Image: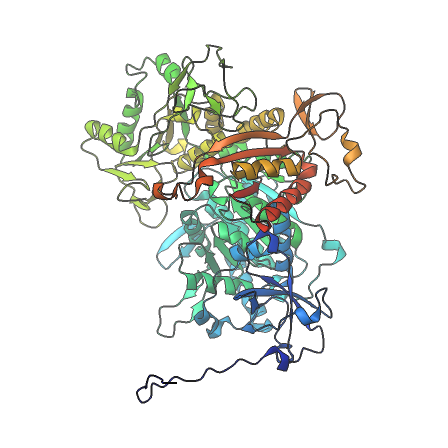
Amino acid sequence: MLEQPSLDGLARKPRRRKKSDSTQSQADNCPIAHIVLDVQASHLGKTFDYIVSKDQDDYAKPGCMVRVKFGTRRVNGIIWSRSESSTTPISSLKFIEKIIPIGEVVSKSFMEDISSIADAYGGTRANIIRLALPRRIAGVDKENLLDDIHLSKRVKWINELQKNFRSNDNCAISQYDGSENLRKTTYARMIATYNNANLLKQSLEDVHKPYYLHHENSSLSNNYKNNCKAFLIDALPGAMRWAQDLAWIIVTAIRAGRQVAVVLPTIREVNDVMRALMVYGLKPYKKSQNPSGTLSGDVARLCAYDSPADRYRAWRAIEKGIVPCVLGTRSAMYAPVESQALFVIVEDGAYQYADGMMPYAQARGVMRLRTQNHNGVFITMSFARSVISQNELKGKNLAAKVSGPLIEIKPFNTIVSNACPWVRLLNLDNLNKINDPSAGSRIPYTALASIRQTLDANLPVLLVTAQDDTVQRAACKKCHSMARCKRCTGPLDLPIDGSAPKCAWCGSAAIGWKCSNCSSGSNFIEAIRVGVNFTAKEIFKIFNDVPIIISSAKQKSGVIEWIDQKPMIVICTLGAEPRVLSSSKNSCGEYGLVAILDAWTSLYNTGLDSRIDTLNAWMKAASMCASKNRGGSVLILGETYDILAKSLEEWDSSILSKQELQERSEALLPPTVCVARIWGFRQAVVDTLNAIGAMSVDVSEDITKVVSKNGDLDSSSNLPMLKVETKDSESVVSGDSSESEYLPPLLGIVPMKPPSTLHEQNSQRFEELNDRVKAVVRVPLEYRDELVNRLKKECAKHFAMRKNGELKFSVDPKDL
């Protein structure tokens, strides 16, 4: 046979055959490794057994990362446990090909967290590992400073931090970054500001074993089991006051020997808390600028803003206990903190906390669940408390795993009164009372006069708009209140074809709709939102001698981070407010006036938490304004809900959250019930709803006949009906089937638009995406686990049988 001659040195080298499995011998003790593979399919969520060879015995420990052969491909995995035997015949098992030499990356407690989160939200452990563990960077693992710190060095380091904190605890002014003098919160300031502040301090300092003494066998004593505490803190107005108070909480927890994980909505809030921690002497964990590039610092950061190497470096530093605190966005909820850690979430109702990948876990529920597993402390802090937090203050009718009782920490009324700006609602009625000649205009004369007065006082003015785009909404033509469904109170949508309006939640047609506020009939109008560019043109015509700055994510200049405390007008969208740098350049300044434009847009937001989210955004903007003692004022321009204006005027979000909770209890909406949102291909969704028992419901069926001894539903039974009992104007949700009013568990089925990422040329290729629907399933809270298990089982069955079409679900969604 003729062969192509090769040049010298370029001859084909024979392949080296890999050592076959037949020549390998298994380990003497526990040769079977149960591995969670990086395979995201729902029906492959179990552990797979592999053989540990003798030369791998010392390194193949639970929590180590390995590489194995799975079918025709090689995948990564985590050793979950080891045992002496396997349910699979030993002849069918393969050897582990490679163990990544970086030690244990998943601790025993973190394994428990991963399993609990997967079970609570209907996912697999592989789904959580994909989100929790950042991509490995081999160069980072070679850095010497990632080696384990000796116990003596770790104890010496924490003692130095404690001594530094104690020496400066009574000082309200601290040196920051060599140039800035910033105020920091002290214990005396907390006691004088908040009720239950002493209880919070005692709970943070009640630590059984500090995290730097944590080992694998660090089980808590019986006295410390189920000893977790949870607190709700209402933030005070004032420039960066919330960050200063949160920094004191973090420092107190670190001083007591706790690791701390803080989840914040965006990178801007992460930087705010980092600056507040630097006042206490803590430094960011990063590489130094010297040629050696040594790593040092006390606070790690986990967010998408950082490079993959920085994220992996920070994650490894937290996992090894090198740093006591981690700040970050949504991904920080999976930070591998140990022992009795402190879990903090800021603005727990923010939309950024809804994970975008299976199993679509919510940050608040994940952190509450981990707090129970670690017997730690949970704190939620926000300007406007969420409805979930308000419900947890009652301490009853709660979801067992992802919820629990809360202790309220609220500022005293005198403190709020002194720190709050003067809030005025300038709607049509109030403008007519003061005889404003321009009543009804977008920016009335009274507001323009206040703006000019503030500019004359050499202070900046902030004008906030709701959103930088246009949106169509259905509303009553007479009273301009939002048109809502009579069946589920959801918002109505106006179809393009001109047919009758339909509910965006349950899909019911609103035929013969009448407004519940004025009963004017089924008349609808279109609500149009005005963006920042049009606002800037209007303002420039009036104040052409004043600098105008636009801050919006949709503008070319983007979001402006800092401005000087000088006479200027800042126009921005909610959430893009620039921080003010004081005239002395050494602290955070304040706006002299904050005006909320187009307040009427709050009447047309369709989200379930729309009013809470609106109040939180308004309070965040108002917190940057000077107090009424220093001449600060907040103007609400336009019509809005009276309860929104009242909550902002009194700086008391509980007024709104209590009413929201009452209304949701009557309408059987979360958090008084458990809700699951299912979407995908129509036939797949319908089959799933039938399989879980959500469509075939018999009102006369006695629920007690289908409940097993342990309290769970029979797997073959239908989901229970929702019973509404009215007692003293309070609705009670239960699964009892006595004579009462019942509502079905299913809302929908409602059509969905194709994904925005789908191009027109691919629409014919994916025909099932043109027939997407969604549905909402509601059950009493005590049946949450049963609903999750049924959905997880049907989803796994759908993909295992390779059925056509998309099928996804999420539990406890942010919106319906």
Q: Is residue 799 left or right of residue 523?
A: right
Examine the rendering and report whether any part of residue 368 can be seen: no
Image quarter where the N terminus lies is bottom left
Q: Between 814 and 244, which is closer to the camera in this rendering? A: 814
* Position in image of residue 176 (x %, y %): 40, 56
Q: Name, please, the residue furthest toward the right.
A: 709
Q: Is residue 634 left or right of residue 652?
A: left
From the viewer's perspective, is residue 75 above or below residue 812?
A: below
Q: Name, please, the residue furthest toward the left.
A: 545
From the viewer's perspective, is residue 88 above or below residue 17?
A: above
* Position in image of residue 712 (x %, y %): 74, 40
* Position in image of residue 333 (x %, y %): 54, 52
Quadrant of the image occupied by residue 338: bottom right
Residue at 33%, 83% in the rendered image: 4
From the viewer's perspective, is residue 90 above or below residue 273?
A: below
Q: Name, please, the residue furthest toward the front.
A: 1
Count numbered badges in the picture: 0
Q: Name, please, the residue furthest toward the top.
A: 520
Q: Is residue 113 left or right of residue 193?
A: right
Q: Between 9 and 328, which is closer to the camera in this rendering? A: 9
Examine the rendering and report whether any part of residue 175 can be seen: yes
What colour scheme was applied to this rendering of the protein?
A: rainbow
Q: Between 173 and 622, which is closer to the camera in this rendering? A: 622
* Position in image of residue 127 (x %, y %): 56, 54
Q: Between 469 and 486, which is closer to the camera in this rendering? A: 486
Residue at 58%, 54% in the rendered image: 253
Residue at 71%, 61% in the rendered image: 219
